Protein backbone atom coordinates (compact mmCIF):
# COMPACT_ATOMS: atom_id res chain seq x y z
CA UNK A 1 0.00 0.00 0.00
CA UNK A 2 1.26 3.49 -0.85
CA UNK A 3 0.47 5.07 2.53
CA UNK A 4 -1.92 4.96 5.45
CA UNK A 5 -5.59 5.31 4.44
CA UNK A 6 -7.49 8.30 5.79
CA UNK A 7 -9.90 6.01 7.64
CA UNK A 8 -7.95 2.86 8.48
CA UNK A 9 -9.66 -0.34 9.53
CA UNK A 10 -8.71 -1.40 13.05
CA UNK A 11 -8.10 -5.01 14.01
CA UNK A 12 -8.10 -5.88 17.72
CA UNK A 13 -6.59 -9.16 18.87
CA UNK A 14 -8.25 -9.81 22.23
CA UNK A 15 -11.43 -7.93 21.42
CA UNK A 16 -13.48 -9.78 24.06
CA UNK A 17 -11.25 -8.66 26.92
CA UNK A 18 -12.04 -5.61 29.05
CA UNK A 19 -9.57 -3.33 27.27
CA UNK A 20 -10.44 -4.80 23.90
CA UNK A 21 -14.10 -3.89 24.44
CA UNK A 22 -13.20 -0.39 25.64
CA UNK A 23 -10.92 0.17 22.64
CA UNK A 24 -13.55 -1.04 20.22
CA UNK A 25 -16.03 1.47 21.62
CA UNK A 26 -13.39 4.20 21.50
CA UNK A 27 -12.41 3.59 17.87
CA UNK A 28 -16.02 3.30 16.72
CA UNK A 29 -17.64 6.10 18.70
CA UNK A 30 -14.81 8.62 19.13
CA UNK A 31 -12.94 8.15 15.86
CA UNK A 32 -15.66 6.75 13.61
CA UNK A 33 -13.51 3.84 12.44
CA UNK A 34 -14.49 0.31 11.47
CA UNK A 35 -13.23 -2.32 13.90
CA UNK A 36 -12.61 -6.02 13.27
CA UNK A 37 -12.17 -8.09 16.42
CA UNK A 38 -10.76 -11.55 17.06
CA UNK A 39 -10.85 -13.36 20.39
CA UNK A 40 -10.96 -17.09 21.20
CA UNK A 41 -13.47 -16.25 23.95
CA UNK A 42 -15.89 -14.87 21.35
CA UNK A 43 -16.95 -17.47 18.77
CA UNK A 44 -18.71 -14.76 16.77
CA UNK A 45 -15.54 -12.71 16.32
CA UNK A 46 -13.62 -12.51 13.07
CA UNK A 47 -10.85 -14.99 12.28
CA UNK A 48 -7.13 -14.28 12.57
CA UNK A 49 -6.94 -14.45 8.78
CA UNK A 50 -9.65 -11.80 8.47
CA UNK A 51 -7.67 -9.43 10.69
CA UNK A 52 -4.47 -10.00 8.72
CA UNK A 53 -6.26 -9.52 5.42
CA UNK A 54 -8.46 -6.54 6.28
CA UNK A 55 -6.94 -4.55 9.17
CA UNK A 56 -4.72 -1.56 8.42
CA UNK A 57 -3.90 -1.17 12.11
CA UNK A 58 -3.49 -4.34 14.17
CA UNK A 59 -3.65 -3.88 17.95
CA UNK A 60 -2.73 -6.68 20.37
CA UNK A 61 -4.69 -6.63 23.64
CA UNK A 62 -3.85 -10.06 25.06
CA UNK A 63 -2.51 -11.43 28.37
CA UNK A 64 1.13 -10.47 28.95
CA UNK A 65 2.38 -14.07 29.10
CA UNK A 66 0.91 -14.92 25.68
CA UNK A 67 1.52 -11.68 23.78
CA UNK A 68 5.06 -12.18 22.34
CA UNK A 69 4.27 -15.69 21.07
CA UNK A 70 0.92 -14.48 19.72
CA UNK A 71 2.57 -11.62 17.83
CA UNK A 72 5.16 -14.03 16.43
CA UNK A 73 2.42 -16.30 15.13
CA UNK A 74 0.65 -13.38 13.45
CA UNK A 75 3.92 -12.23 11.86
CA UNK A 76 4.62 -15.70 10.52
CA UNK A 77 1.10 -16.08 9.18
CA UNK A 78 1.04 -12.60 7.69
CA UNK A 79 4.18 -13.41 5.69
CA UNK A 80 4.87 -9.86 4.59
CA UNK A 81 1.28 -8.70 4.04
CA UNK A 82 1.73 -6.41 7.06
CA UNK A 83 4.29 -4.25 5.24
CA UNK A 84 3.05 -0.66 5.16
CA UNK A 85 0.61 -1.27 8.02
CA UNK A 86 0.80 -0.41 11.73
CA UNK A 87 1.05 -2.86 14.62
CA UNK A 88 0.46 -1.79 18.23
CA UNK A 89 0.19 -3.51 21.61
CA UNK A 90 -1.12 -2.34 24.99
CA UNK A 91 0.50 -4.81 27.40
CA UNK A 92 2.05 -3.82 30.75
CA UNK A 93 5.47 -5.16 29.69
CA UNK A 94 7.05 -3.72 26.59
CA UNK A 95 10.44 -5.17 25.64
CA UNK A 96 9.29 -8.62 24.53
CA UNK A 97 6.08 -7.56 22.71
CA UNK A 98 7.82 -4.72 20.87
CA UNK A 99 10.68 -7.02 19.86
CA UNK A 100 8.14 -9.53 18.57
CA UNK A 101 6.35 -6.85 16.53
CA UNK A 102 9.69 -5.72 15.08
CA UNK A 103 9.98 -9.27 13.72
CA UNK A 104 7.24 -8.28 11.29
CA UNK A 105 7.51 -5.82 8.39
CA UNK A 106 4.89 -3.47 9.89
CA UNK A 107 5.51 -0.13 11.48
CA UNK A 108 5.55 -0.61 15.25
CA UNK A 109 4.76 1.19 18.51
CA UNK A 110 4.04 -0.13 21.99
CA UNK A 111 1.42 1.52 24.19
CA UNK A 112 0.74 1.09 27.91
CA UNK A 113 -2.29 2.85 29.44
CA UNK A 114 -1.50 3.29 33.14
CA UNK A 115 -5.03 2.47 34.20
CA UNK A 116 -7.63 -0.26 33.98
CA UNK A 117 -10.24 0.37 31.27
CA UNK A 118 -11.81 3.63 32.47
CA UNK A 119 -15.50 4.39 32.84
CA UNK A 120 -14.95 7.59 30.86
CA UNK A 121 -14.84 7.61 27.04
CA UNK A 122 -11.15 8.67 26.86
CA UNK A 123 -7.97 8.37 28.92
CA UNK A 124 -8.13 12.01 29.99
CA UNK A 125 -6.23 12.50 33.25
CA UNK A 126 -4.35 9.20 32.87
CA UNK A 127 -0.80 8.49 31.76
CA UNK A 128 -0.15 6.58 28.53
CA UNK A 129 3.40 5.31 27.96
CA UNK A 130 4.38 5.35 24.28
CA UNK A 131 7.29 3.23 23.04
CA UNK A 132 8.00 4.25 19.44
CA UNK A 133 9.94 1.52 17.69
CA UNK A 134 9.58 1.80 13.90
CA UNK A 135 7.45 4.68 12.68
CA UNK A 136 7.46 6.51 9.37
CA UNK A 137 4.30 6.88 7.31
CA UNK A 138 2.01 6.08 10.24
CA UNK A 139 3.46 8.68 12.63
CA UNK A 140 0.85 11.40 11.87
CA UNK A 141 -2.01 8.94 12.35
CA UNK A 142 -0.56 7.66 15.62
CA UNK A 143 -0.22 11.25 16.86
CA UNK A 144 -3.89 11.82 15.96
CA UNK A 145 -4.82 8.67 17.91
CA UNK A 146 -2.89 9.87 20.97
CA UNK A 147 -4.58 13.27 20.76
CA UNK A 148 -8.02 11.61 20.59
CA UNK A 149 -7.22 9.46 23.61
CA UNK A 150 -6.54 12.69 25.56
CA UNK A 151 -3.99 10.96 27.80
CA UNK A 152 -0.82 12.42 29.26
CA UNK A 153 1.58 10.73 26.84
CA UNK A 154 5.09 9.88 28.06
CA UNK A 155 7.71 8.53 25.65
CA UNK A 156 10.07 5.79 26.79
CA UNK A 157 12.14 2.99 25.34
CA UNK A 158 10.81 -0.53 26.00
CA UNK A 159 13.76 -1.25 28.31
CA UNK A 160 13.25 1.91 30.38
CA UNK A 161 9.52 1.19 30.53
CA UNK A 162 10.01 -2.32 31.91
CA UNK A 163 12.57 -1.21 34.49
CA UNK A 164 10.24 1.58 35.59
CA UNK A 165 7.22 -0.74 35.79
CA UNK A 166 9.13 -3.04 38.13
CA UNK A 167 8.95 -0.12 40.58
CA UNK A 168 5.72 1.61 39.56
CA UNK A 169 3.64 -1.56 39.30
CA UNK A 170 5.36 -4.73 40.54
CA UNK A 171 6.82 -3.22 43.73
CA UNK A 172 3.70 -1.19 44.57
CA UNK A 173 1.32 -4.09 43.96
CA UNK A 174 3.54 -6.42 45.99
CA UNK A 175 3.56 -3.96 48.90
CA UNK A 176 -0.21 -3.83 49.02
CA UNK A 177 -0.66 -7.56 48.53
CA UNK A 178 1.73 -8.12 51.44
CA UNK A 179 -0.29 -5.67 53.53
CA UNK A 180 -3.45 -7.57 52.60
CA UNK A 181 -1.79 -10.78 53.77
CA UNK A 182 -0.87 -9.25 57.13
CA UNK A 183 -4.43 -7.95 57.53
CA UNK A 184 -5.81 -11.38 56.67
CA UNK A 185 -3.70 -12.94 59.41
CA UNK A 186 -3.93 -10.29 62.14
CA UNK A 187 -6.90 -7.94 61.61
CA UNK A 188 -9.32 -10.45 63.12
CA UNK A 189 -7.73 -9.90 66.53
CA UNK A 190 -8.86 -6.24 66.53
CA UNK A 191 -12.28 -6.37 64.89
CA UNK A 192 -11.42 -7.18 61.28
CA UNK A 193 -10.95 -4.70 58.46
CA UNK A 194 -14.22 -2.95 59.27
CA UNK A 195 -13.05 -2.43 62.83
CA UNK A 196 -9.72 -1.06 61.64
CA UNK A 197 -11.39 1.30 59.17
CA UNK A 198 -13.41 2.79 62.02
CA UNK A 199 -10.03 3.79 63.51
CA UNK A 200 -8.61 4.80 60.13
CA UNK A 201 -5.99 7.33 59.27
CA UNK A 202 -5.97 8.75 55.74
CA UNK A 203 -2.89 6.63 54.97
CA UNK A 204 -4.53 3.39 56.11
CA UNK A 205 -7.72 4.18 54.19
CA UNK A 206 -5.75 4.85 50.99
CA UNK A 207 -3.68 1.68 51.34
CA UNK A 208 -6.74 -0.43 52.10
CA UNK A 209 -8.45 1.03 49.03
CA UNK A 210 -5.49 0.18 46.79
CA UNK A 211 -5.39 -3.39 48.10
CA UNK A 212 -9.15 -3.71 47.54
CA UNK A 213 -8.76 -2.38 44.00
CA UNK A 214 -6.04 -4.89 43.14
CA UNK A 215 -8.02 -7.80 44.60
CA UNK A 216 -11.21 -6.72 42.79
CA UNK A 217 -9.83 -6.72 39.25
CA UNK A 218 -8.56 -9.43 36.90
CA UNK A 219 -6.08 -11.56 38.90
CA UNK A 220 -4.30 -12.72 35.73
CA UNK A 221 -3.17 -9.16 35.01
CA UNK A 222 -1.58 -8.73 38.44
CA UNK A 223 0.02 -12.16 38.21
CA UNK A 224 1.57 -11.36 34.84
CA UNK A 225 2.81 -7.95 36.03
CA UNK A 226 4.88 -9.80 38.64
CA UNK A 227 5.93 -12.85 36.64
CA UNK A 228 6.12 -11.28 33.17
CA UNK A 229 8.50 -8.42 33.94
CA UNK A 230 12.12 -9.66 34.08
CA UNK A 231 13.06 -6.74 36.35
CA UNK A 232 10.39 -7.47 38.99
CA UNK A 233 12.42 -9.98 41.06
CA UNK A 234 15.19 -7.43 41.61
CA UNK A 235 12.69 -4.81 42.79
CA UNK A 236 10.96 -7.29 45.12
CA UNK A 237 14.25 -8.45 46.61
CA UNK A 238 15.18 -4.82 47.28
CA UNK A 239 11.79 -4.20 48.91
CA UNK A 240 12.16 -7.31 51.05
CA UNK A 241 15.64 -6.23 52.15
CA UNK A 242 14.37 -2.80 53.20
CA UNK A 243 11.51 -4.30 55.23
CA UNK A 244 13.82 -6.87 56.79
CA UNK A 245 16.26 -4.15 57.84
CA UNK A 246 13.42 -2.07 59.31
CA UNK A 247 12.09 -5.08 61.24
CA UNK A 248 15.59 -5.78 62.58
CA UNK A 249 16.03 -2.20 63.85
CA UNK A 250 12.58 -2.08 65.45
CA UNK A 251 13.13 -5.49 67.02
CA UNK A 252 16.49 -4.35 68.40
CA UNK A 253 14.69 -1.41 69.98
CA UNK A 254 17.58 0.45 71.63
CA UNK A 255 18.90 3.97 71.07
CA UNK A 256 21.37 2.79 68.45
CA UNK A 257 18.53 1.16 66.49
CA UNK A 258 16.48 4.35 66.70
CA UNK A 259 19.44 6.37 65.42
CA UNK A 260 19.84 3.88 62.55
CA UNK A 261 16.16 4.19 61.72
CA UNK A 262 16.36 7.98 61.60
CA UNK A 263 19.49 7.93 59.48
CA UNK A 264 18.56 5.19 57.02
CA UNK A 265 14.79 5.45 56.66
CA UNK A 266 14.07 9.13 57.29
CA UNK A 267 17.10 11.31 56.59
CA UNK A 268 18.58 9.29 53.72
CA UNK A 269 15.20 8.84 52.04
CA UNK A 270 14.35 12.53 52.42
CA UNK A 271 17.61 13.41 50.74
CA UNK A 272 17.15 10.74 48.10
CA UNK A 273 13.69 11.88 47.07
CA UNK A 274 14.55 15.58 47.15
CA UNK A 275 12.65 18.61 48.35
CA UNK A 276 10.68 19.13 45.13
CA UNK A 277 9.32 15.57 45.14
CA UNK A 278 8.55 15.75 48.86
CA UNK A 279 6.62 19.00 48.46
CA UNK A 280 4.63 17.70 45.48
CA UNK A 281 3.88 14.38 47.16
CA UNK A 282 2.84 16.00 50.41
CA UNK A 283 0.48 18.32 48.53
CA UNK A 284 -1.05 15.36 46.67
CA UNK A 285 -1.53 13.51 49.95
CA UNK A 286 -3.28 16.50 51.52
CA UNK A 287 -5.64 16.81 48.55
CA UNK A 288 -6.50 13.11 48.74
CA UNK A 289 -7.04 13.46 52.48
CA UNK A 290 -9.48 16.33 51.96
CA UNK A 291 -11.29 14.30 49.30
CA UNK A 292 -11.67 11.29 51.61
CA UNK A 293 -12.97 13.56 54.36
CA UNK A 294 -15.54 15.07 51.99
CA UNK A 295 -16.69 11.66 50.79
CA UNK A 296 -17.23 10.40 54.35
CA UNK A 297 -19.32 13.43 55.38
CA UNK A 298 -22.87 12.37 56.30
CA UNK A 299 -24.18 15.82 55.21
CA UNK A 300 -24.09 15.00 51.51
CA UNK A 301 -26.23 14.07 48.54
CA UNK A 302 -25.49 12.09 45.40
CA UNK A 303 -27.11 13.58 42.31
CA UNK A 304 -27.25 12.65 38.64
CA UNK A 305 -27.92 15.34 36.04
CA UNK A 306 -30.09 13.73 33.34
CA UNK A 307 -29.34 16.52 30.83
CA UNK A 308 -25.67 16.54 29.91
CA UNK A 309 -25.41 20.05 28.48
CA UNK A 310 -23.75 23.39 29.23
CA UNK A 311 -25.54 25.09 32.11
CA UNK A 312 -26.92 21.91 33.74
CA UNK A 313 -24.64 22.15 36.77
CA UNK A 314 -25.33 25.86 37.14
CA UNK A 315 -29.07 25.20 37.18
CA UNK A 316 -28.55 22.55 39.88
CA UNK A 317 -26.50 24.89 42.05
CA UNK A 318 -29.06 27.67 41.69
CA UNK A 319 -31.72 25.42 43.22
CA UNK A 320 -29.69 25.05 46.40
CA UNK A 321 -28.93 28.77 46.39
CA UNK A 322 -32.64 29.63 46.23
CA UNK A 323 -33.29 27.47 49.29
CA UNK A 324 -30.44 28.98 51.29
CA UNK A 325 -28.28 25.85 51.25
CA UNK A 326 -24.51 26.45 51.33
CA UNK A 327 -22.49 23.85 49.38
CA UNK A 328 -19.22 23.04 51.13
CA UNK A 329 -17.82 20.50 48.63
CA UNK A 330 -18.53 19.24 45.12
CA UNK A 331 -17.05 16.13 43.52
CA UNK A 332 -17.84 14.12 40.40
CA UNK A 333 -17.45 10.44 39.55
CA UNK A 334 -18.65 7.95 36.96
CA UNK A 335 -20.63 4.75 37.33
CA UNK A 336 -19.49 1.51 35.64
CA UNK A 337 -21.88 2.45 32.83
CA UNK A 338 -20.17 5.82 32.43
CA UNK A 339 -22.98 7.93 33.94
CA UNK A 340 -21.68 11.14 35.52
CA UNK A 341 -22.67 11.63 39.15
CA UNK A 342 -22.08 14.57 41.49
CA UNK A 343 -21.66 14.40 45.25
CA UNK A 344 -22.49 17.59 47.14
CA UNK A 345 -21.48 18.23 50.75
CA UNK A 346 -23.15 20.93 52.85
CA UNK A 347 -22.17 23.31 55.65
CA UNK A 348 -22.77 22.15 59.26
CA UNK A 349 -25.62 24.62 59.80
CA UNK A 350 -27.74 23.26 56.96
CA UNK A 351 -31.27 22.46 58.06
CA UNK A 352 -32.98 19.24 56.99
CA UNK A 353 -36.02 21.21 55.79
CA UNK A 354 -33.89 23.30 53.45
CA UNK A 355 -32.41 20.20 51.84
CA UNK A 356 -35.81 18.53 51.56
CA UNK A 357 -37.24 21.57 49.77
CA UNK A 358 -34.27 21.72 47.38
CA UNK A 359 -34.52 18.00 46.64
CA UNK A 360 -38.26 18.30 46.01
CA UNK A 361 -37.66 21.10 43.48
CA UNK A 362 -34.97 19.09 41.71
CA UNK A 363 -37.37 16.16 41.38
CA UNK A 364 -40.28 18.37 40.28
CA UNK A 365 -38.26 20.20 37.59
CA UNK A 366 -36.25 17.18 36.46
CA UNK A 367 -32.99 19.07 36.90
CA UNK A 368 -31.43 16.33 39.05
CA UNK A 369 -32.11 12.79 40.19
CA UNK A 370 -31.22 11.79 43.73
CA UNK A 371 -29.06 8.70 44.07
CA UNK A 372 -29.58 5.98 46.70
CA UNK A 373 -27.61 6.44 49.93
Image: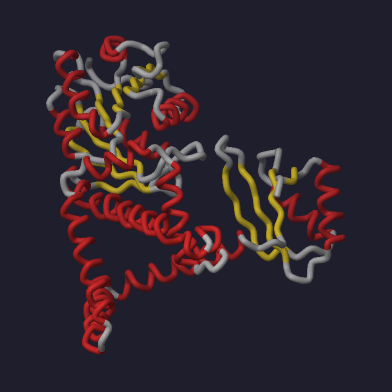
- Tell me what residue is drawn at x 25 percent, y 89 percent: 255
Count of all numbered marks drawn on residues in the image: 0
Q: Position of residue 304 (x, y in %)?
A: 69, 44
Q: Specify the quadrant of the image occupied by residue 285.
A: bottom left
Image color mode:
secondary structure
Q: From the viewer's perspective, is 4 left or right of 290? A: left
Q: From the viewer's perspective, is 280 left or right of 70? A: right
Q: Specify the quadrant of the image occupied by residue 321.
A: bottom right
Vertical placement of residue 81 versus 354, above or below: above
- Tell me what residue is drawn at x 39 percent, y 55 percent: 180
- Tell me what residue is drawn at x 38 percent, y 23 percent: 15
Report the quarter where the N terminus lies. top left
Vertical placement of residue 1 versus 373, above or below: above
Q: Specify the quadrant of the image occupied by residue 219.
A: top left
Vertical placement of residue 275 versus 359, above or below: below
Query: Front-most of 143 and 12?
Result: 12
Query: Front-most of 253 and 212?
Result: 253
Q: From the viewer's perspective, is 191 left or right of 357? A: left
Query: Front-most of 246 and 106?
Result: 246
Q: Position of residue 197 (x, y in %)?
A: 53, 62
Residue ranking furthest to the bottom: 255
Amino acid sequence: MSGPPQRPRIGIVGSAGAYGRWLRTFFESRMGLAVIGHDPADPASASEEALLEQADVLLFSAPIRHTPELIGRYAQRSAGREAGRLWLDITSVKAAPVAAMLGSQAEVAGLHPMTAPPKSPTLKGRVLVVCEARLQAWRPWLEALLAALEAECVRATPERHDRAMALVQAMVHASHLAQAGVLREHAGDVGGLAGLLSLRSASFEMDAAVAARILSLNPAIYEDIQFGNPHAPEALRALSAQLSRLATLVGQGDDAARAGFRTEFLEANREGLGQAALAAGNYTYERLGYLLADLSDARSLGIHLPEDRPGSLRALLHVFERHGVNIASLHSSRTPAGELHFRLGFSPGTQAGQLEDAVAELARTGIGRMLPG
